[in-house]
Amino acid sequence: MRRSPATIQAHATMPDQALWGETVTPVYQTTAFSQRSAQDLADLFQGRLPGYNYSRIANPTCTNLEQNLAALDDGLGCIATASEMAAIAAVAIGLLRSGDHLIAANGIFGGTISLFVETLAWMGIRTELVDASDTQNVERTITPRTRMIFVETIGNPRLDVPDIPALAALARKAGIPLVVDNTVMTSALFKPKSLGADIVVYSASKFICGFGTAIGGAIIDTGLFDWSAGPFEQLHKSPERNGPYAFLAYMRNVVCRNLGSCLAPWNCFLINQGLQTLSMRMARHVENASYLAEYLAVHKAVKRVRYPGLPGDRFYERTRRLFGGKAGAILCIHLADRQKAFEFLDGLKLIKQAPNIGDSKTLAIHPAPTILWQFDKDQRIKMGVTDDMVRISVGLEPFEQICEDVEQALSRLAR
């Protein structure tokens, strides 16, 4: 019987083989796994025998999470990592070499931009940031050395929406993978594979976990890219041994193993707990965010609201076409200036000031001097971030109480 996404989520913590009748996969809090013979251990290390030898490579608790995430995205497989930054870094290091070229959207998370333009530059990898919401910008930027296109489903915090099917077609024509960060939407709202994405990455710390209790990331191979034909010499021997699993095998047994980017079993357990209610939570997140965006769009103290699900937003029609109108739970408001933004934030009583998104609680932040402080003003403007902007991650509280808190904080600005 094919299980629905909601069923997969509800059974996210169920073990494949229960030893004592347990209904939750236990936390295998162990560094290593012993074997009955020296030959068994050797066979495990060399891939001739299934099982576990060392938790830096694989762990049963983590396998449970990986299987669930892969199933929810209709993926070939998944590798859980210590954070999403570890996931993105592993993909980049696994696929790119000195002299290679990477194209990334300029409205993505600042930490990812820093990784691309600073850290990868130390390795001789050149990153070009473009407004990827216009596919022609990406097309004009592709060179013979381009090896990857990277976008977010909905940019954070710019909230732009790239045309993923068009980018997928462009990447396929160039013979390179399209990597999509689907953190803001999650598989509960949108599956990037359905529109042609080759690799999907997540910050599982956000909506997937849902309760702000664990840091984690994930890499999912959708199975759409032919790794035996791509320009990745490091993988060309692997397909003979691993077939369509060449990328996943290389990432787990070489890149992630050598980088030590494994996710701790306890964090896998916590993330799986959150995964059980993902669809229900995302429906409430989106409902609350939509209501709040509509309310703020006509508020006299607010200059402008950015939310792709709001009629009139420049990405409203694309959001309807690609995601059925579901636009996630992040919105941005622009107030009179930086001082008013600070006054608004300091006037909040229920909503917390914190740098996370995707928590069950509504969170707000002034991005310019916090999560993007290391970028200069011109760089921030290209990311869609101005000094008067506040980002709100809308939580699960009753909408009336979210609205009441926002209203009382905005009412102070008019005094």
Image: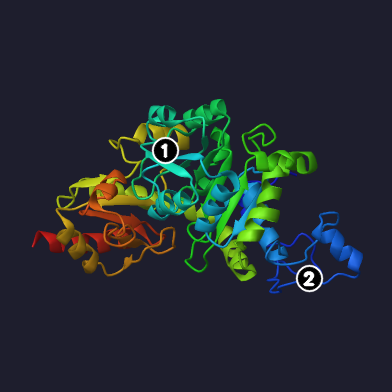
Dot 2 falls on a residue whose secondary structure is loop
Q: Residue at x 35, y 66 (%)?
A: 354
Q: Residue at x 50, y 50 (%)?
A: 123
**As drawn, is 69 to the left or to the right of 163?**
right
Q: Nearer the viewer, mark 1 or mark 2?
A: 2
Dot 1 falls on a residue whose secondary structure is loop
Q: Is residue 10 visible?
A: no
Q: Amino acid at mark 2?
A: Phe
Is the residue marked by circle 2 packed among few (<14), some (14-19), or many (20+) residues within 10 Å? Answer: few
**As drawn, is 65 to the left or to the right of 371?**
right
Q: Which residue is mark 1?
A: 325
Q: Which residue is mark 2?
A: 33
Q: Amino acid at mark 1?
A: Gly
Q: Position of residue 154 (x, y in %)?
A: 41, 44
Q: Position of residue 254 (x, y in %)?
A: 68, 54
In this view, the residue farthest toward the left is: 415
Q: Quadrant of the C terminus?
A: bottom left
| Badge count | 2
Q: Nearer the viewer, residue 20 or 259?
A: 259
Is the residue marked by circle 1 packed among few (<14), some (14-19), or many (20+) residues within 10 Å? Answer: some
**As drawn, is 10 to the left or to the right of 112?**
right
